[in-house]
Amino acid sequence: MFVQIDHVDKVFPLANGGSYVALKNIELEIKQGEFVSLIGHSGCGKSTLLNMIAGLDRATAGGVILEGREITEPGPDRMVVFQNYSLLPWLSVRENIALAVDEVYSRKPKGERNSIIEHHIALVGLQHSATKRPNELSGGMKQRVAIARALAIRPKLLLLDEPFGALDALTRGGLQEQLMHICEESGVTAVMVTHDVDEALLLSDRVVMLTNGPESNIGQILTVDLPRPRQRMEVVKHPDYYPMRSEIINFLNQQKRVKQRQSAKFTQVPQTKKLEQTTVNIGYIPLTDCAPLIVAKEKGLFAKYGIEQVNLCQEASWDAIADNLVSGELHAAQMVAGLPLALTLGMNGRPSTPISVPLVLSRNGNAITLSTDLYNQGICTLQNLKAAISTVTIDRKLTLGIVHSCSMHNLMLRYWLASAGIDPDTELNLVVIPPQEMVDLLRSGEIDGFCVGEPWNTQAVQEGIGFVIATDLDIWAGNPEKVLGFRETWVQQHPNTHSAIVRAILEACEYCDEPRHRPEILTLLTKYLNISPQYIRPGLIGPFDRGGNALPENLPRYHQFHVENANCPRRVEGLWILTQLARWGIVPFPKNHIEILTRVRRVDHFLTACQQLGYIGIEPDRDPFQLFDGQVFNPEDPLNYLENQPIHRELEIKNITLA
């Protein structure tokens, strides 16, 4: 890759001894010959990032690499065009350009240097003004001199910091077209900072949109797939132009709302380290993956951070978790991964209740279990199931249990079925059942299978009434399973208590993934789940048994609580969840999804807790990824992914107004 911006952070020290994090985890690759624009509200760090690419500033963490070498200082392979022209007032047009050429090409003959100077004066159409000084030039002419000077030394990278921001509209338009033609002819790679949406679309191959500071990061990248060479009027008339323009404006409007909300919040919260509340109620469902909550309580981690009493409240269902968190009876809760997003959007006629997720509690740990009766009929693979349904080998609709419509169990079961052409709503019955009731209903024959977390799959296998046809490792290894959720308003009112809870549970997650602690955790889970340890052990400590004729197998990541950055509430994963909730008509797909994800998936809270604990915390790249069927999810184009799913409901797409 030509330019790599590799996980860059930029922190500025403050006079009071504190620090300001301007940029956080910026990851971007730029191809040779590409024109990339950086856009975002004032203060988002666009110029700071450009300065680091130029070598005028250094990253606090990470780095910028040009053709395999880290940029540590300015160099002639990068030239910057500033908004204020930066011309020497006592030199003429020709002399300003010559200053750069003579410095870089000092070993070339004078005649060759003069040819380079004259060529670039002509390139920007200033032959008639070559002897004039800056005070004799218009603003547009000065900027043309700056561009000619930058290009004259043939840089590998042209950097433009709002180069036309001070110009009138007519002059700006002319220079934009001239710059576009120059870049196309010379093949130079360019990075431009701009506030102008139309300018970005006209000039760019990609538009990189930055979120608000502090801790600004890349919120979205838009590929401008318009043919080149471009003419302004042809670009404006292109059918994709206004949809792309709307997408950028929508992003900027989302960030504006976020900034207004944050400003209001910060004026309300007193700055104190004292815990606002020392008794808290945390909801959970009895499953293996509630282990971090139990460990945090039983190992004294909550008390370590000043929380005197923690009531772990066992709830009957995920709907009960939602109701009690919204009502305020619970202050925090273990939640299925899609539930915070759905509550924030206002699912099933509920008013919007924004939920804050600072941590993923667990990854993986789910399985799809079918009855042994189906196994005995030869249905032991997804393809067998599809064939049986298609040929009416089964004379009735199968009924499968899920734990909640917004759970990963439901979304992954549906994804798995749909990948084989099975419509989960028309060819099967999916019913919501609390996890702890699954085995009893399978035993009685009221359901034919289920998708649920442990220990219920293992219990069905060991009782001989079920077999595991697929685990989530087979569908999407490393998927976010359970998360820690808070009401956003509670977090705003109790920031220090919230911070203490997050740190205690994050430390507990690390404890849970240490193999030597697993026997102790097994004992604790046996107590809280009130179930035999033989059902909890497989996959947590020993080999996992799928049943049927399969041999038990070691699945070291079947229960993943902390390793491999497991606790980060990654926004790209949240976006995939939003596509699947919309795919099945559970919630509309929000046009303002970046605002929703920024508000729910609180990476900033996660990173703060990591910093306080001395952990290495980072949000992974926004790279495309795929599940088991090979379909690529591109986070920059979620609607295209949604619309190309093999089976989906009529899509409802709208802006969601949050509480």
Image (spheres, rainbow, N blue to C red):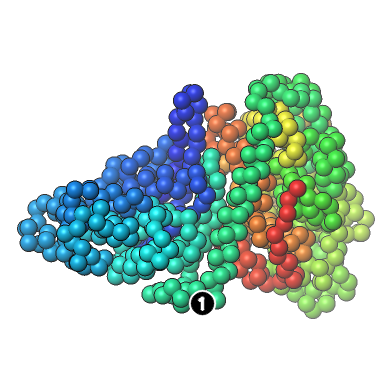
Give the x, y percent position of residue 363: 66, 46
Q: Which one is in front, 541 or 2?
A: 2
Residue 635: image location, x then y, percent: 57, 59
Residue 73 is left or right of residue 521, and the answer is left
Picture layout, residue 377 above or below residue 590? below
Residue 496 sits in which quadrant? top right
Q: Residue at x 46, y 77 (%)?
A: 234
The residue under the point 52% across, 44% down is: 216
Quarter occupied by the N terminus:
bottom left
Q: Nearer the viewer, residue 62 or 301?
A: 62
Residue 417 seen in this snapshot: no
- Point out residue 61 in the picture as x, y percentages from the top left corner: 43, 38
Residue at the spot 44% in from the left edge and 43% down from the top edge? 8
Asked if residue 560 is positioned above or below residue 150 in the image, the reply reads above
Residue that label 1 marks: 237
Amino acid at the residue labelled 1 = Lys
Q: In the image, residue 342 lies at what x, y percent?
A: 76, 53
Quarter-wise, where is residue 498 in the image? top right
Q: Residue at x 24, y 53 (%)?
A: 134
